[in-house]
Amino acid sequence: MRSAGSDVVGRNQVNCPSLRSNVPGQPFAEVVGPQDISFPFRGWAFVTVGWGGTPAARRDAPVRGRTFGLLVKTGPRGGRTVWADIAGYEQAWNPASGPVDSNPYGVLAEKGGVFVADAGANALYVVRGKWNTSLVTTFPRTQNPAECRIPVGPGVVGPPAPPSSEPVPTTVARGPDGALYVGELTGFPFCAGAARIWRVQEAQAPTVHLTGFKSIIDMAFARDGTLYVLQYASSPSGLGGPGQIVRVARDGTRTVLPTGATLQQPAGIAIGPSDGALYVTNKTVTPGGGEVLRIVP
């Protein structure tokens, strides 16, 4: 589950870098740092440290010497070990054949390997042992709905969105059928209905499992197979409006949970193993405002 302004595991601090942009006119600054955390077994965790740009630029000021674009392992006593250079893999191989860009985001750590969704490279990787990264699959561009418009301002109808956008995979989860499931944020202009959930089996081409979502940032399966999809925003395009949680029953029925305007810049969702409640990180790019919400579905 993604942290809300904190990178503490248990009582031990895991020191990871973070970087905040300062772009005039933007309501929220872009922030990269620890993106997601996953526990393969008690006491150990894997953390993705984001980047969001050309991997070679990590050598430039002001980030020189800081460990962005990596998969980091931490243990019961804290500290960290660089487990894989995800951005370096993109720089060397660029498997999706697009712009060389990497942003390690979603992570799923299991005993057999650690899966990383790279939102910049549009790829899913698996790391089986230290520095042993390999490609699972890449994802194609998503088609934007014909009615989607580029946001230009309140009450102003902008020009039509381009025919397609980058997929931007942000989350990976193991489904009840044993397959992997990967959700998309999609790229600008973040059209409602354009985001997909992919079903992935290793050594096979990915297949579209569900369509019609908006800016998926995380998701989690409950024990009964229900899927909870966390959407970062709810506006027709752009990243405006409150976030949403969509409950997808095993028969495909969808329900938007009644959270009103509570979810603002949500980034992670987890299901409590004992109470079945949803735990959501919220206000994740608001300085000093990060919080964890408990929501009973």
Image (cartoon, rainbow, N blue to C red):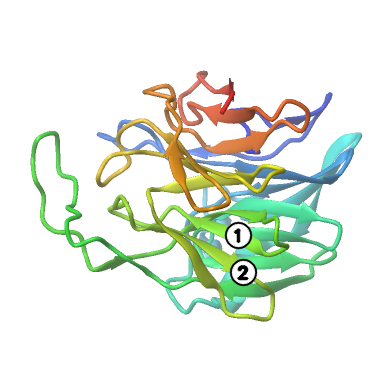
Nearer the observer, 87 or 218 = 218
> x, y percentage for residue 228?
55, 42
Q: How far separated are the C-alphas under marks 2 and 1?
A: 6 Å
Disc 1, SS: strand
Q: Earlier in the sequence, mark 2 or mark 1?
A: 1
Q: Are marks 2 and 1 in contact (CB under 8 Å)?
A: yes
Residue 118 visible, this angle: no
**Residue at the image point whose x is 42% and y is 28% from the top:** 264
> x, y percentage for residue 208?
48, 68
Q: Which residue is mark 1?
A: 181
| Residue type, mark 1 in image | Tyr
239 is higher (above) or lower (below) than 9? below
Nearer the observer, 95 or 57 = 95
User: Is residue 139 shown left or right of residue 165?
Assistant: right
Disc 2, SS: strand
Q: Quadrant of the N terminus?
A: top right
| Mark number displayed over residue 200 | 2
**Residue at the image point whose x is 61% and y is 51% from the top:** 106
141 is higher (above) or lower (below) than 257? below
